[in-house]
Amino acid sequence: MEAWRGVSLFVLMLSGGFGVGCGPEAGWEAEVPGGTSVAVQEASLGSGGAQPCGRSPLSVGDLQPGMEGSSPESLVPVGVQLFYAADDGASGRELWVTDGNERDSRRVTDLRPGPAGSTPRFLTRVGGRLFFVADDGAHGPELWRTDGTSQGTVLVADIRPGAAGSAPDNLTVVGARLYFTADDGVHGRELWSTDGTAKGTQLTQEFAPGPASLFLDDLTEWNGRLALVAYGDTSVTLWVTEGGTGTAKVFFRGPAQTVLFALTPVGLDRLFFLVDGGLGEADLWVSWGLPLLTFPLRHFPGDYPSELTPMGNAVYFMAGAEGFFGEPGDHRFGGELWKSDGTLLGTRRVKDVNPGPAGSLPSGLTALDGRLYFAADDGVHGRELWSTDGTSQGTVLVQDLEPGPVGSTPTALAATDGWLFLSAATAERGREAWYSDGTPGRVQSLRDIAPAELGSNPRGFVRSGGYVFFVATHPDQGEEPWALPFLLMGRCGQGAG
């Protein structure tokens, strides 16, 4: 198989379009409206002893009345505020927020008046502010920031004046700066960074001098450094930019047909990534912090290894599955859970959950309190929730939610404050929300949002303030935000407010 799968990365990154507007300059500060620092507010919430309060999720608001719903996207907590993009049916897709312990939502500002909307994207927390890309209809897609108020929503910098905009992408926080790629119309698409002010927004590195551009992708924070991949006409390069000096070093270079992706930091010293040399199969590589200590660990036939997930001193992933077009994977074990500590001997299969070439095909890998949770099919119980401590003996079925060979197919796994939230489907209830403290046999269901077996397809679980928020579909409301009270032990009866 050709390495055409890398094309999808290019299409996703090149096809976006957004825009923006201007406002007064101000740097980001770790504060929220009212003068209380984010650190203080978050500490006051606490995490020890916090728990779901009951099983009944609450509607955050029917933002777009009717069956279509507002289709919320990108739920991002900042301090005790929750931001997301949604379409209320009148203002187009704009930025919304729910404040503190209130679950009612309000539009932050109508950045682009009219039904077109500003289409906020790439929502990214930096300190006590939210940064995002949007199009106000005048400046084109540019970088904005907000503190959750209309007055505090401002254009960071008009990098490319005019309606075309610079289309910032790959927003990544490293230390006190936000890095991203942008095209100012002069230098092509290059690496930029900002401290949150127009004056402090600058071209950081020009990888292709002049108006030409390399395709920059996979920006990743790595222990105070920025790692990124640059695709050129003749080569593909993994660059690592040192914090402070801004000097970029080459850690890997391959020929033009190479696809390099899935940059995953583990601990303080290792960066794992995948390399497809043009054959449609990938090798797992690791860097131990220096170009000379960057090397391949293992080749995996068939489908690409997927869902590289750090836990402790290792990275976990699925590998060995059959390729998309039937290319053979691991003939003996199939797709199973693997781990690597960055050494050849330490790169190994965790457990053969489903003996035989079919494999258990683990997915949804999520770390919680020293254990990794995932969905897998052992060939007996169907696709259900499993967990592991990284050993074969410690890899166990958490609970058989839908007895029989079909299984409940858990998805949307998310860990927050010692609890695991997920979406799972049963014949009786359809696909609804569940939660667990990780104890085997103690996965509990939330009350149905959609009646009977219809299912509400919950996703995007995230904690903010006194709630765990998520997106779900009610047959009369469409897809809207919902919330489950989540408070310190002993406060559940008092409510989230």
Image: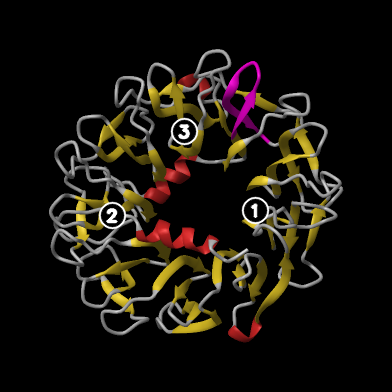
Which amino acid type is shown beneath numbered disc 2? Gly
Is 293 left or right of 91, judged from the image as shown?
right
Q: Secondary structure at mark 2?
A: loop
Which quadrant, please, contains the C terminus?
top left
- For label 3, the SS is strand
User: Bounds of the magenta span?
Assistant: 422-437
Horizontal and vertical percent position of residue 305: 66, 59
Q: Is residue 150 visible?
A: yes
In this rendered view, identify the residue nearer to me: 201 or 40: 201
**In the image, residue 435 lies at what x, y percent?**
61, 30
Amino acid type assigned to the residue bearing label 1 in the image: Phe
Q: Is residue 494 magenta?
A: no
Q: Quadrant of residue 114?
A: top left
SS category of the residue bearing label 1: loop
Q: Is residue 235 above or below residue 28?
A: below
Would residue 271 appear left or right of 121 to someone viewing this image? right
Mark 2 lies on residue: 17
Q: Quadrant of the N terminus?
A: bottom right
Q: Percent position (x, y) of residue 163?
A: 15, 58
Q: Are the residues flagged by discs 2 and 3 in contact, CB closer than 8 Å?
A: no
Q: Residue at x 48, y 66 (%)?
A: 221
Tell me which residue sits at (63%, 69%) in the image: 279
Q: Earlier in the sequence, mark 1 or mark 3?
A: 1
User: Looking at the image, is 481 positioned above or below residue 257?
Assistant: above
| Magenta-span inclusion, residue 433 | yes
Residue designated by label 3:
470
Residue under circle 1?
Answer: 325
Q: Determine if residue 310 is in view.
A: no
